[in-house]
Amino acid sequence: MSDIRGYKCPNCGAAVPFDPNAQKLVCGHCGSEFDTDALDSYNQLVQDVKEDSLDWGELDKAGLNGEGMRTLVCPSCGGSVVAEQTTSATCCPYCGNTLIVPKAFAGMLLPDLVIPFKLDKEAAKEGFKQFLRSKKALPNDFKPERILSKVQGLYVPYWLFDCDAEASARFLATRTHSRREGDYQVTLTDHFYVYRDGEISFEKVPVDASQKLDNELLESLEPFDYEQAVSFNAAYLSGFLADKYDEEPDEAVVRANERIRNSMLMALRSKVLEYDTAILDASSLRLNHAQRSYALLPIYIYSVVYKGENYTFAMNGQTGKIVGDLPADGQKLLVTFVKYFLLAFVLIFVLSFLMLGGWL
Amino acid sequence: MKKLFSIFVLLAFLLMGFDVAAQGQLAVDETGLLTSEEIEDINRQCAEASGRLGLKVTVLFTAEAFDGEAYEAAADYYDRVFYGEEGVILYVNFYTRDYAVVSSGEVIDRELSEKPVAYILDNYILNELRAEDYCGAVSSFIEGLDYVFVHSTDFVEQPLSTAEIVTDSALIAAFGGLVVGLIPTLINYYQLKNCAPKKEAQDYIDPQRVKIYRSGDLFLYRTSKRVRIADNSGGSKGGSTRFTGSSGISHVGGSRKF
């Protein structure tokens, strides 16, 4: 580190010489005055903020076992089923038997946890029906009964990230007050450099490990209750589909880092109180005791093509939360708008007419 | 006895104070700022205006402190000197830097109601007072009186025609209908699109293990900004108002700063 020290104005960045008359450091460019101790402390705080240290250790690169498709043979009826390489469990289309691929869960591919489905298929169908029926702007020919017969329960692969996160945040904050002096309104603004350093433990931040499924859709289904998670057993997969991961942990960790960073900054910002403004100036994040685990989480999912567009909606197989992107009937929306517009127009017109005419 | 009686009457008149001397004088200067020629000129202007307009036109220059609003102080003075007479007063107070116009009598429902008085306050008198041209300020005041008397119908609010009422009502109803119509439409639309990515990981924080181990607030510097306040205070929220003076007589008046 250099022994040479310089003083720069926090307001405009210009050099700040010592003014013997004021006995303070005074910026020649903007005129701001600073105590020497305050500017020394400010320089120290700025230098204290280090680079990010987002070390998750060695994230295993398990890799995929080959590309493309493969053929599974049903042990019940002998039927052949073609499935993707990443499929871990599927359903025989001939006899309905569940086909589980044991090698899909061997070695590094063995999930650490699974959250079993809490809602059965009937409950899922009923939930979806209610969800679709309550949507007033859904097209009439987007009928739930016809669609929901094909709802599938799927165990989605997730990476779960645990860590103790330490963060430092520096804020430029202001406090303003004004008063009247004769014919003038005087506004005084005090500028502060606010620092907050803290630590938060994160448990099992989920990032989906499947490239086939939309991240936005799956994140909308959160949160999952990990207290109901159990050690993996292939028996839980019976009756459901399952995939193994096709997104490596070092790709997924980028999303986890972003969410952890945002949570840390939110927590530190919430401790900056009684200021009129507080803008983030610098921050750093360090991860300790970082771990990742591999889990299968339960989701009911359905995709439908309607008028050439693909629409997907999903249900959290543990909590029952439903999210989705559904088509909107433009005509129904227009009818809704016109109905409320006319009603309001008539009422407001009558009221205005009576008031402007002096009858009310 | 006769001598004693005469002395008594003279003393009584003297004890009634300045107001007795002011009786009959339309313009009074209590400050001594104006010369006698200026006072005479102002009195002449007021007398001419009084004859022309058919009411008392009076002026008071003072530097006396008062409680309440300047127009209330003006009304109190007018009632003390010209009680019950129809007229108008221009009141200028050099101590508080207020000037007020207050009308009295039946004219408060005609040529000198709220709008005309506010018009005179806002468009006359001020520039001359700021320029310390006090005779000019009185001339400007009388000019303002002449204007509102000639254009008295301009200040009377005409009722809206039926066509105007219908048009205005339709515009208001259309805007209100648009807002009311959009709300349920947008609600119905966004019910269909409820996917939202998570920007943070609040659901996965162990609340027992959240701690802030270092915090501080370092004062750096202060900046200040001075802005001149617009000079339009006075009167009742900037206009003029109808009020009852301490004598119980109704007036219309307003005041401004100079």
Image (cartoon, helix red, strand yellow):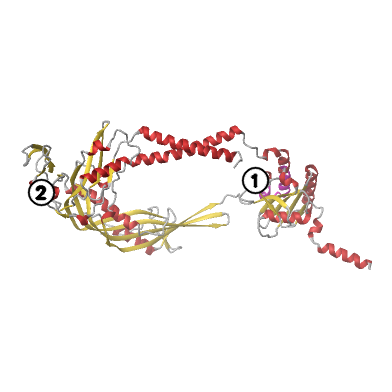
For the point 81% across and 57% down, the residue is B21
Kind of residue sitting beneath label 1: Asp
Name the residue carrying label 1: B122
Residue contact between numbered discs 1 and 2, judged by CB atoms under 8 Å: no
Q: Residue A204 in magenta? A: no
- Secondary structure mostly taken by the magenta-highlighted segment of the chain: helix
Crowding at dot 2, Cα within 10 Å, few <14 / some 14-19 / many 20+, comes out as: some
Residue at 13 percent of width and 47 percent of height: A238
Please provide percent x and percent y for residue B147: 71, 40
Q: Position of residue B251 (x, y in %)?
A: 71, 51
Seen as rendered, the residue at the extreme top is A307
Nearer to us: label 1 or label 2: 2
Nearer the observer, A93 or B142? A93
Tags 1 and 2 on a common chain: no
Q: Nearer the viewer, residue B85 or A143?
A: A143
Residue placed at 47% from the left, 37% from the top? A343
Amino acid type shown at disc 2 = Phe
* A182 horizontally vs B23: left or right: left
Residue A105 is labelled as 2
> Is residue A103 visible to the viewer in this orientation of the structure?
yes
Which quadrant of the rendered structure holds the N terminus of chain B? bottom right
Inspect this view and state whether residue B258 appears: no
Relative height, residue A96 to residue A285 (above, below): above
Task: Count every numbered label the image shows and give the total.
Answer: 2
Relative to the observer, which residue lies in front, A80 or A170? Answer: A80
Range covered by the magenta-colored residues: B127-143
Q: Chain for mark 2?
A: A
Specify whether A249 is left or right of B63: left
Position in image of residue B111 (x %, y %): 72, 43
Q: Secondary structure at mark 2?
A: helix
